[in-house]
Amino acid sequence: AIGGYGGGLLGGDVVELEVAVEAGAALLLTTQASTKVYRTKRDGIAATQSLNATVDDGGLLVLAPDPVVPYESAAYEQRQRFMLSPAASLVAVDWVGAGRVSRGERWAFSHFASRNEVLRRPEAGAAPAKAVAVDAMRLSGGAGLLGLDLGRVEYDTVVSVLCSGEEAAPVAERLRMLSSALAHRRVGQRPGVLRAALAEEVSEPAAAAARALLGNVVVGVGVAQGSAAPKGGGGSGGGAGAGALDVVIARLAAEHTEDVFRLLHFAMAPLAPRLGASPYGLRIHADVAALCPIKAGAAAAAAAAAPPPPTTEAARATSSLAAPLAPALSIARGLSIRAPGGNGWVPVQRAISAAAGLPPGEEAPPPPPLALSPRQRARMAHLSDATLPTGGFAHSGGLEAASQLGLLGGGDEAVRRFTRAATHSTATLLAPFAAGACSLFSSPVGKEGPSPAQWREWEALDTALHAQLSANGPARRASAEQGRALSRVGAVWLRQEAAARDLCAAFGDRGANPNRAPHGATMLGALCALLGLPPQVAAEVIAYTTARDVLSAAVRLNLVGPLAAVEMQADVAEEAAAAAAVAAQRGVANAASSAPLLEAMHPCHDLLDRRIFRT
């Protein structure tokens, strides 16, 4: 077990761990208890932990900690890298709790960031290792912004489980069965919601584990198939090659910590013979669990006193879709809005920082003011227009799955909360890639096209985004489909400019997906550059079109009316555009999703039997 000094981590604490599992060895890393993170000092410096692990052929590393529990106003950052040989195995759990729920603290920390990377160890003389799969999360802004209170359910813990290698395969299979079993548990006897074959794929132990839970749990499972294979131009693609790694990533969101202990114990039980111990076995103290009265009372009290969602009128002015961000931030000085959850009032600038995932005390840096020409404004409007045939309206962003599985709840406010969380999460994940691709091609492209170095950098961006979308199969497919569509649109739009036209067509055959389609964000960034638009526009178009597409899906699913959707889009999109502009400046290394419940819901779209939307 990993021990520590004192009762937890304080701001400024730095914990670094190096782990090596040699050939044929097995290592189980646990913690003595949950990792408490106390509130930061006024300097806002976060507590940080890092883990660098290597696993040789035949080795097994199991990382099974208790949750990290950040207290109110705490700041915490974590990075974990797992370098695996082709025949190595890994099971890694990354887990964060809402805080001291019995004291009324729910997602009240200032900042939480976690990044897990799985890499394939390169052969001697080969290029440096690149991430096969990335699971990254940046949380701030309270439960409302994180989308963790959908359907009148308070989700108080979120978990990621990464599995790779032969010995981890039984764990991955059990997680898949749990995902299906929990979906069946929610749907009950309603016919036609889930694929009929799912019932046959779920073992009785998995079904029993799902039935025994105290509260709501959502499990979504995605697969990163293989490592990138070399291809023309010196870049990397997405096909599996020799010695390729498959990484299964499961994301869980649960009401109760006790349920997570039980599900992880069930999923990881096949590892016990090799490890000599059953992970999380010592955390299970009874055959039947009961809800703690303290938590039950706190949940009831919170539900009764639930305030209306925070107003975004002041934050709305920060988007450069309406005005340049820098003057808006200047105007915002001294203004306040109600904090998420209704706990007092906070400065607008701090709210923008929280939406963008910035540490406490660090104000959102204003991007350079935009001075767009009439031609640029027209192109920006056309790029955001619903008539552009990019296929965005074929995707619901996980809304259809949330609705059919009964996770959304009813009423316009449920749709608003979902849209806000989905738009913020998508913007903070994709905006850095779109802005990065735009910056890469900001110089005019000559008749010879991009240089080999430019192609390598763009392909590296696309490959990195592909790895980061590994945990969400529907989102990864939607991104590829829209990237391919954007490459076709660009070739037609710029048909009078031969070099730009040919470049757009070339993008369609250089993506990281197995079918060579580029991802939507990296293709959008490149297209913005060819249209003479700055990186900030690429970031804001991501935010605007995400809100537009989700709300269009809501209207088509009859969850909200068209006029209500207009008001919601005005409320959500401009606020998210400000967060996207700030996230773009943070760079690709800090790109991360920010709505863990939605990330767990979205892969469940593939479990549905009857679907209007492709994802």
Image: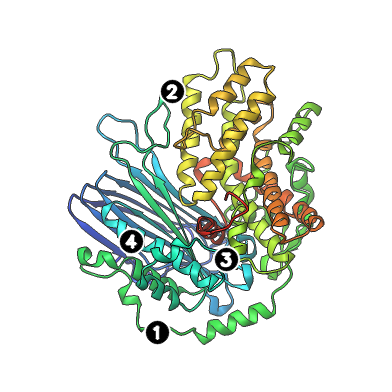
Answer whether residue 7 is visible to the viewer in this image: no
Q: Which residue is identified by label 3?
A: 405
N-term-proximal mark, 2 vs 3: 2
Where residue 469 appears, x then y in whole percent? 49, 47
Q: CA distance from mark 2 to mark 1?
A: 58 Å
Q: Which residue is identified by label 4?
A: 171
Residue drawn at x 27%, y 29% is 125
In the picture, the quarter occupied by the N terminus is bottom left
Q: Which residue is identified by label 2?
A: 233
> Which quadrant holds residue 200?
bottom left
Could you say whether the residue bearing mark 4 is in a helix, strand or loop?
Answer: helix
Residue drawn at x 58%, y 12% is 447
Q: CA distance from mark 2 to mark 3?
A: 44 Å
Q: CA distance from mark 4 to mark 2?
A: 38 Å
Where residue 36 appears, x then y in whole percent? 45, 69
Mark 2 vs 1: CB contact within 8 A? no
Q: Which residue is identified by label 1?
A: 288
Mark 4 vs 1: CB contact within 8 A? no
Residue at the extreme top of the image, as rendered: 447
